[in-house]
Image (cartoon, rainbow, N blue to C red):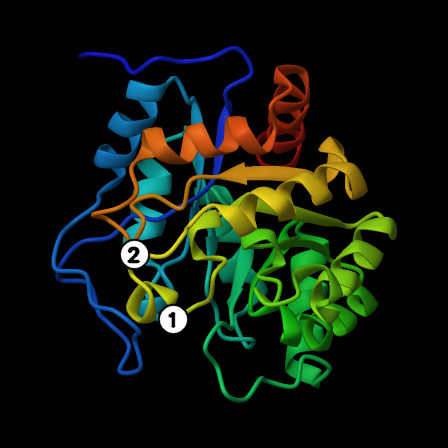
Amino acid sequence: MASATTFVGDPIVDCHAHIFLPDMPISSGAWIRPDYAFTADDLLAELDRHGVHFAVISALSISGHYNDYLISELRFHKRLRGTAILTPDTERYVLERMKEDGVVGIRLQLARQEKLADFRSDEYRLLFRRVRDLGWHVHVAIEGPQLPAVLDPLLESGVHVVVDHFGHPDPKAPFECPGYRAMLEAVDKGRTWVKLSGGFRLPGTSAWREDPDGDLEELAQSVAERLLGQVGTDRLLWGSDAPFVGYESRVSYSDVLASYRRWVPDERKREEISRTALKLYFS
């Protein structure tokens, strides 16, 4: 199999990718409905072409609580870990079995939601305690202006937190965004990590429809540079967001690796980010 060009410091772990089949259940409110498959084998082949060894699978938001395919592939492929989207009443026995299968956390997929759950409710406090007891983390995806309302109860619960897609800061004023500031404060408390992933999504959750030919990189570059200085490599992770749902015609795995090298041009810092990922997901 032909191999793409690799560079010193290229990631060892892809901390954000998706896998799915075309006939998987799709939620009624799904923002998109892919008509193709991107299987675990497809992902692993992509990793091999680019010299990436491991990956963390993010549960597919459009499939709701259907984690069946994710779990079956984690069982089979030991190079993979995953986060699952769960109801808050999921019993510990179920969580323990999922941990044995390779699940390392839960995903709160909250983007595009008009109303958020009460994350201080009894049921969520119980879920977060179980997550904490299992040594898992809570993986959060939400628009930056709404992030503080989620981060506050999570930090109160004592769980580890991974914030998706740079924290999705407001594209109009990213560094003044309440979520960006709250994210930095959370990192300072020692239990939060930030993913440099899906930079092409930062112009907005609807930009892929509203401005399909717009600049995908400028905002991610500036936010990544700022995060590198403010957060540091021990709290940063990298993810491809393969297979780039909604952007398949514009983004490839080679493209996102090239973007990452621009965001973090120092190969030693990229190596440090890889060590951070290995420790968090595979230790």
Q: Residue at x 49, y 43 (%)?
A: 100
Residue 49, label in figure: none
Q: Is residue 104 visible?
A: no
- Dot 2 or dot 1: first in sequence order is 1
Give the mark toward the camera: 2 or 1.
Answer: 2
**x then y, percent, for residue 191:** 78, 50
Badge 2: few (under 14), some or many (20 or more) residues near its Cα, within 10 Å?
few
Q: Secondary structure at mark 1?
A: loop
Q: Residue at x 58, y 34 (%)?
A: 263
Of 213 and 63, nearer the camera is 213
Of 100 and 50, nearer the camera is 50
Of 205 and 76, nearer the camera is 205
The residue lying furthest to the right in this view is 189
Q: Is residue 224 left or right of residue 185?
A: left
**x then y, percent, for residue 242:** 34, 43
Q: Is residue 190 left or right of residue 18?
A: right
Q: Is residue 167 visible?
A: yes
The residue beneath circle 2 is: 213
Of 243 and 20, nearer the camera is 243
On screen, 179 above or below 190? below
On screen, 148 above or below 13? below
Quadrant of the image occupied by residue 146: bottom right
Quadrant of the image occupied by residue 158: bottom right
Q: Secondary structure at mark 2?
A: loop
The residue beneath circle 1 is: 206
The amino acid pointed to by label 2 is Asp
